Image (spheres, rainbow, N blue to C red):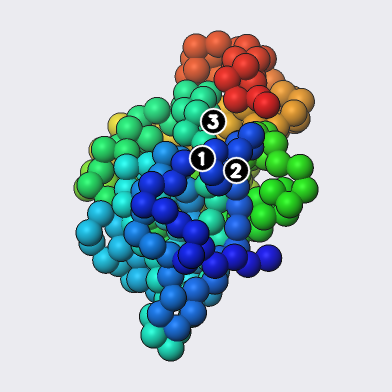
């Protein structure tokens, strides 16, 4: 399914004009040979993933080139326009979602600080994805297209956020001046992948390519954590997202996040989040469930 928005975009789009009664909207959009949408703003959020081609994205008066693999989060305050170059084409998936749903998800997922940074920045956050990270995004956006054509639910939207937002978080880590040397930044970003988290500390050591002692010193210097603390923190963050966005049993989630000892998982989870996994899930579902 594709749709050209060039004739129906208004200067200020309202959610009830886009997807009344729904929590999200998903569309496959194609622009060719200089065509594009009108410059506009809106009262909702959007995420876009470039599938193929290239184009020009003008945001708040600044132009950037879009390429295959680009991921962007567009905020309500942003005024933007997307267009294909003359003689070229641009294909992207756009997922729009209600501001109310977004605001309900953030505290449950522990993303208040991240969202605050994204919202206060001069330009919206974005990242160029490649290899496995690009495949993760493509699959997530395609799933949203299918879900929107079927019976879209807020739970499906929460699954989408839990998969795609860590990709933006990893970009934040990569551009943080205090993230340390390149080898450490690469290893820390890679550890967000579920399989790497499952393997835990041995995988972090392998990804770093340095001795365990050197890794420990450098991680403590730049992140203020030991390698074990760093891995557990990522695991607990992922566990919180799974509790908020799936119906998997808690013992299954603990195992999927690399915790073999359930009592240890409960103890560490309470230390980080201030409540039990069960209470966290109940609170999250009250916040975001349809």
Q: Nearer the viewer, mark 2 or mark 3?
A: 2
Left or right for 257, reference 223: right
Instruction: Check whether the beta carbons of the residues at disc 2 and disc 1 lie within 8 A of each other.
Output: yes
- Residue drawn at (69%, 48%), measured in percent from left and top? 148
Which circle marks residue 15 in the picture? Answer: 1
Please report whichever mark, 1 or 3, sits nearer to the chain's N-terminal start.
Answer: 1
In the image, residue 125 sits, relative to residue 242, either above or below, namely below
Regarding residue 237, the answer to whether it shows in the image is no
Report which residue position mark 3 lands on. 101
User: Would you call the spot at circle 1 few (<14 residues within 10 Å), some (14-19), or many (20 or more)?
Assistant: many
Q: CA distance from mark 2 to mark 3?
A: 13 Å
Left or right for 134, reference 230: right
Q: CA distance from mark 1 to mark 3?
A: 12 Å
User: Would you call the spot at circle 3 few (<14 residues within 10 Å), some (14-19), or many (20 or more)?
Assistant: many
Residue 219 picture location, percent across and down: 33, 41
In the image, residue 76 sits, relative to residue 255, either above or below, namely below
**Helix, strand or loop status at disc 2:** loop
Regarding residue 59, the answer to whether it shows in the image is yes
Residue 264 picture location, percent across and down: 62, 19
* Nearer to the camera, 127 or 153: 153
Q: CA distance from mark 2 to mark 1?
A: 6 Å
- Residue drawn at (67%, 40%), measured in percent from left and top? 156
**Helix, strand or loop status at disc 3:** helix
Report which residue position mark 2 lands on. 19
Which circle marks residue 207 in the picture? Answer: none
């Amino acid at each position: 399914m594709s749709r050209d928005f060039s004739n129906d975009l208004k200067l200020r789009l309202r959610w009830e004009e886009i997807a009344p009664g729904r929590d999200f909207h998903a569309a496959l959009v194609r622009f060719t040979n200089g065509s594009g949408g009108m410059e506009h703003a809106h009262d909702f959020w959007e995420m876009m993933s470039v599938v193929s081609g290239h184009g020009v994205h003008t945001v708040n008066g600044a132009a950037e080139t879009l390429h295959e693999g680009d991921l962007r989060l567009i905020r309500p305050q942003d005024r933007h326009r997307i267009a294909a170059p003359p003689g070229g084409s641009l294909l992207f998936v756009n997922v729009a979602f209600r501001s109310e749903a977004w605001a309900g998800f953030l505290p449950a997922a522990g993303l208040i600080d991240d969202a605050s940074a994204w919202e206060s920045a001069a330009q919206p956050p974005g990242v160029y994805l490649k290899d496995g990270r690009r495949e993760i995004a493509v699959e997530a956006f395609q799933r949203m297209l299918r879900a929107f054509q079927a019976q879209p639910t807020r739970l499906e939207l929460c699954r989408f956020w839990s998969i795609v937002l860590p990709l933006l978080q990893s970009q934040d880590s990569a551009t943080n001046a205090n993230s340390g040397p390149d080898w450490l930044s690469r290893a820390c970003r890679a550890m967000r992948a579920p399989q790497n988290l499952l393997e835990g500390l041995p995988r972090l050591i392998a990804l770093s390519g340095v001795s365990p002692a050197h890794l420990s010193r450098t991680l403590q210097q730049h992140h203020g954590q030991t390698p074990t603390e760093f891995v557990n923190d990522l695991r607990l963050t992922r566990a919180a997202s799974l509790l908020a966005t799936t119906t998997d049993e808690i013992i299954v989630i603990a195992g999927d996040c690399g915790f073999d000892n359930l009592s240890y998982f409960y103890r560490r989870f309470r230390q980080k989040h201030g409540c039990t996994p069960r209470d966290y899930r109940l609170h999250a579902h009250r916040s975001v469930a349809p």
